[in-house]
Amino acid sequence: MVAAGTLGTPTASAATRPLRVTLPPPTGPHPVGTVSLHLEDRSRPAPWVSSIPTRELMISIWYPAAQNPCRAVPWLTPGAAATFLAGVGLNSTQVTLPDTHAAEGVPVARTGRLPLVLYSPGFNASRVFNTAVVEDLASNGYLVVTVDHTYEALMVEFPGGRVVTGQVPDGGRPVFAEAVDIRVADFRFVLDRIADLDRGINPDVHQHPLPADLKGAFDLGRVGMFGHSLGGATTASTMYADQRVKAGVSLDGSAIGAVAAAGLDRPYLVMDTSGKGGMNNDPALREFFSQLRAWRLAVTMRDSAHYSYGDLEILYRRLADLLDMPQRELEEQVGTITPHRAMAIQRAYPLAFYDLHFRYRGHLLDGPAPAYPEVLFRAR
């Protein structure tokens, strides 16, 4: 969850040259392509804003590409970037936000039907906040679809430059539960539109051009999902509501609603932190885990905190001095693990999970690995 002011207040001695933030390149054998689509669900009104009669979403599709990108798309679109920076008291003269490693609209690599992985961000966050992991999955042969949950998301930019910010009231767990229900409906709608895409039907409101060879690229029998924080709870609840999702990963998330007591009958990986949340401090998550009836595993990333998962691990550390963030506050957000190690772990373990259950290969999840001493195996 990221709110305005979370990152602190800029110091008076901010550097005149913009501080540049970069993301690590993907590790897989494929270059990466991406395309963003504007979807509209006319069967539902907008949540949180009663005057809007339809549900609008922005999604991005990430995929193994047939050619290397000559120009990568930015991490955030211009209007969303300006909104994000203003929310933390900065601007583009102080910070240059990352580019991705993906080219827009390039053809999909001809490698047969590809497993699909859905991504749901944290509460009051953005679909771009886990780009480093999303790109890595795509570079390793997965189609990944990221979703912004409009009016709850920190900011969403629609075609034409319209930026919509979060409108969710304070309210704690009851609001989170309502948000999860809305998110589940979002993902069920998105899955229907992905089925359209696989048949060659363009669901984009503006008929934005689709990448060549996207038709027929989705293996809708191999659908996974992952999410950070409330996105982890969304993953569990979406799997409970929709049998199309075959395997799930939670990055320091919980379980909210009926799924906490009911559990699931499909593979599930819990990755938590050594911070305030996780299996140690979340009774609902422990109950949910105890009710999992298929393959299951819980691991902890040592020396980590809630935002050790996702791109904010990198942004917090790069911006800490500029924002005069005390070391104690920084460690409360991202722990003491280095960004390099945090990124390596959160890329390796979800990839190994989907490879195991969708491609039937790999041994990383068999037990503790010397290459990842920071990962503690907690329960099976």
Image (tube, grey):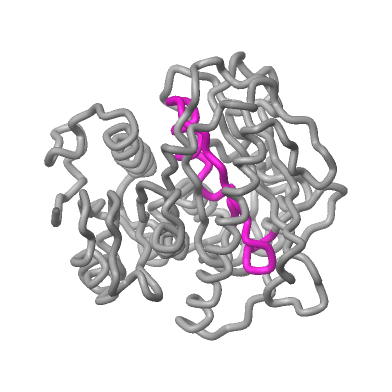
Residue 217 placement: quadrant: top right
Residue 69 placement: quadrant: top right
- Which contiguous range is marked in magenta? 126-155
Query: In this image, 36 relative to 263: left or right?
Result: right
The residue lying at 14 percent from left, 38 percent from top is 366
**Residue 360 seen anywhere in this rendered image of the structure:** yes
Tell me: residue 195, above or below residue 240. above
Residue 52 placement: quadrant: bottom right
Among all residues in the image, which is located at the extreme right? 160
Of residues 187 and 13, the one nearer the viewer is: 187
Rendered location of residue 309, percent (x, y): 40, 51
Figure disc tally: 0
The residue lying at 45 percent from left, 39 percent from top is 133
Tell me: residue 17, above or below residue 317. above
Residue 283 colored magenta?
Answer: no
**Residue 330 seen anywhere in this rendered image of the structure:** no
Query: In this image, 235 relative to 39: left or right?
Result: left
The residue lying at 77 percent from left, 43 percent from top is 204
The residue lying at 61 percent from left, 14 percent from top is 67
Query: In this image, 117 relative to 61: left or right?
Result: left
Tell me: residue 315, above or below residue 326. above
Of residues 218 and 148, the one nearer the viewer is: 218
Tell me: residue 1, above or below residue 250. below
Rendered location of residue 194, percent (x, y): 61, 42
Rendered location of residue 78, percent (x, y): 77, 46
Of residues 78 and 159, the one nearer the viewer is: 159
